[in-house]
Image (spheres, helix red, strand yellow):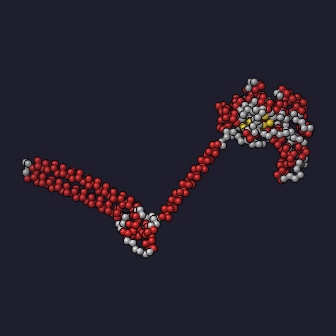
């Protein structure tokens, strides 16, 4: 309602707000209704009737209660002064009696003093109910008028509607927010995985140390890891998307922990030899205490389990590139992206004059048996200083890069053993070395001839071409053949990763 309206105008405004058609019809017909008539019609339509606002809120809520309180205080003042006056009058009479009659005046004085004190106390006690009534009356009147003012305060219909709509919108938005938050939380919980994401051609990034320690060092998690990597079955295999890669970071892992991990994931070389499948478990370094294993067979098997997935993964990547090269070169027209990829591979394999035939010779696998045998020979089955300090599995030399100084090199020898950040980097550098260095051209030519005859590339067919890898020449290749035969490394020639697609022999 608007301010400064008469009581009748406020009644008419209430009729408009509540849409009382009877009053509106009277107004349209220009019939004047009395205040009493309007009041009657509103009451008939159950419209609350406000009080007459002739007395202002200030006067009703503050002025009148204060006035009543003042009267109460005035009565208290009068009662108190009357009692005190009577007391002093009586005291004065007592004093006069004391002055006039020295013998009996003292007794009468104290007697009167006692009576006057009692009357004064009673007068004060009588004022307490009046004070209480005055205060309670003030509070009561103030509250009554306050709530009355709320009841008869302004009512603007449009503002009320806006307030209700705003409140409804706020509730709706909050409900939507809570719903989306709940859905997101449920989605995150259902999609949390305890394994690494599978990435083809790329090793998974290293997890934080705390997460890896939970996976490796807590043996009670055996059931969970069995769910992630189940024991291979001869007749039924998992799809590649169901097998995860596992990258083990530099945590100075002990051999005991490594053996426990192999047991938990059921990583067994007998199964690998039979099924020709190996789990994608990539170690970034050898256990520092690998040499402490007294059982020679167990030490060698542990070494092979660590190196084998790294070698197979690099071969798998090379085969993918070789298939892609064959597809591109068989096309009459190539895209800019394909041309860019070809230029990249020509640089990687150090091929000059864009010789695709030479690139095809160099872009090929290294037999797994040869890689394992050379890794075992050059690293002392993973226990040499170069392997433990610099992840140097294949003992590659360097004259320019950062490396590890050999302890027994000659005075005129300036080489160092090339160090690597992780084991897989050493494997990649080793394969690039055999596929690009001019000292191993015979190795590549013989491998290419085997490929052209559509035969399986085997290590024992190529060991004699690696006499330039070491200074001992023929003696070195004999040792490689001996390592391959004694440890049955030829069984791993056709092994593939469990998360890779089976590739048929490439037809040239």
Relative to 10, is 264 on the left or the right? right
- Please tell me in which quadrant of the rendered image residue 205 appears: top right
At horizontal 73% and vertical 39% (from top left) the residue drawn is 242
Give the residue at the far bottom of this rendering.
Answer: 30
- Please tell me in which quadrant of the rendered image residue 262 appears: top right
Q: Is residue 292 above or below residue 500?
A: above
Image coordinates of residue 148 in percent, x first then y, are 38, 61
What is the quadrant of the C terminus in the image?
top right
Relative to 235, is 139 on the left or the right? left
Q: Is residue 202 above or below residue 170?
A: above
At horizontal 50% and vertical 62% (from top left) the residue drawn is 161
Image coordinates of residue 274 in percent, x first then y, are 80, 30
Image coordinates of residue 87 in percent, x first then y, are 17, 54
At horizontal 26% and vertical 55% (from top left) the residue drawn is 130
Q: Nearer the viewer, residue 129 or 158?
A: 158
Q: Nearer the viewer, residue 129 or 191?
A: 191
Q: Is residue 398 visible?
A: no
Q: Nearer the viewer, residue 458 or 136?
A: 136
At horizontal 43% and vertical 69% (from top left) the residue drawn is 23
Q: Is residue 83 visible?
A: yes
Give the residue at the far top of this rendering.
Answer: 294
Image coordinates of residue 72 in percent, x first then y, are 27, 58
What is the quadrant of the N terminus in the image?
bottom left
Count the numbered circles shown: 0
Q: Is residue 141 above or below residue 508?
A: below
């Amino acid at each position: 309602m608007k301010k400064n309206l008469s009581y009748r105008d406020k009644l008419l405004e209430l009729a408009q707000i509540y849409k009382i058609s009877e009053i509106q019809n009277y107004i349209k017909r220009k019939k004047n209704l009395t205040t009493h008539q309007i009041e009657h019609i509103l009451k008939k339509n159950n419209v609350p009737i406000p009080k007459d606002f002739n007395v202002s809120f200030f006067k009703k809520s503050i002025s009148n209660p204060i006035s009543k309180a003042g009267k109460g205080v005035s009565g208290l003042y009068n009662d108190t002064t009357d009692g005190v006056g009577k007391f002093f009058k009586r005291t004065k009479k007592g004093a006069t009696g004391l002055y006039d009659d020295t013998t009996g005046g003292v007794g009468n004085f104290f007697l009167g003093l006692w009576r006057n004190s009692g009357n004064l106390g009673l007068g004060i006690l009588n004022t307490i109910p009046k004070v209480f009534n005055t205060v309670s009356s003030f509070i009561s009147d103030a509250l009554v008028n306050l709530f009355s003012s709320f009841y008869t305060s302004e009512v603007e219909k449009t503002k009320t509607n806006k307030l209700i709509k705003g409140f409804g919108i706020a509730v709706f938005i909050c409900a939507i927010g809570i719903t989306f938050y709940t859905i997101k939380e449920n989605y995150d919980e259902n999609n949390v995985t305890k394994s690494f994401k599978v990435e083809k051609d790329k090793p998974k990034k290293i997890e934080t140390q705390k997460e890896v320690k939970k996976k490796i060092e807590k043996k009670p998690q055996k059931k969970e890891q069995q769910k992630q990597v189940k024991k291979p079955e001869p007749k039924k295999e998992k799809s590649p998307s169901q097998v995860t890669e596992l990258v083990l970071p530099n945590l100075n892992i002990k051999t005991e922990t490594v053996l426990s991990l192999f047991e938990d994931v059921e990583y067994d070389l007998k199964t690998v030899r039979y099924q020709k499948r190996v789990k994608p478990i990539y170690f970034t370094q050898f256990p520092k205490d690998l040499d402490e294993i007294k059982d020679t067979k167990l030490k060698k098997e542990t070494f092979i389990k660590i190196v084998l997935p790294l070698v197979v993964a690099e071969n798998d990547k090379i085969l993918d590139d070789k298939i892609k090269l064959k597809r591109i070169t068989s096309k009459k027209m190539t895209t800019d992206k394909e041309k860019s990829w070809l230029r990249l591979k020509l640089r990687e394999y150090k091929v000059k004059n864009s010789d695709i035939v030479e690139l095809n010779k160099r872009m090929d696998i290294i037999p797994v048996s040869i890689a394992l045998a050379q890794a075992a020979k050059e690293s002392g089955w993973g226990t040499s200083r170069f392997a433990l300090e610099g992840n140097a599995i294949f003992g590659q030399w360097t004259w320019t890069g950062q490396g590890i100084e050999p302890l027994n090199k000659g005075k005129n020898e300036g080489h160092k053993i090339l160090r690597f950040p992780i084991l897989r980097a050493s494997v990649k550098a080793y394969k690039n070395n055999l596929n690009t260095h001019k000292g191993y051209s015979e190795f590549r030519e013989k491998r290419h001839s085997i490929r052209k005859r559509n035969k399986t590339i085997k290590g024992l067919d190529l060991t004699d071409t690696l006499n330039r890898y070491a200074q001992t020449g023929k003696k070195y290749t004999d040792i490689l053949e001996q390592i391959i035969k004694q440890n049955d490394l030829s069984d791993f020639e056709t092994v593939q990763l469990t998360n890779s697609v089976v590739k048929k022999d490439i037809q040239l």
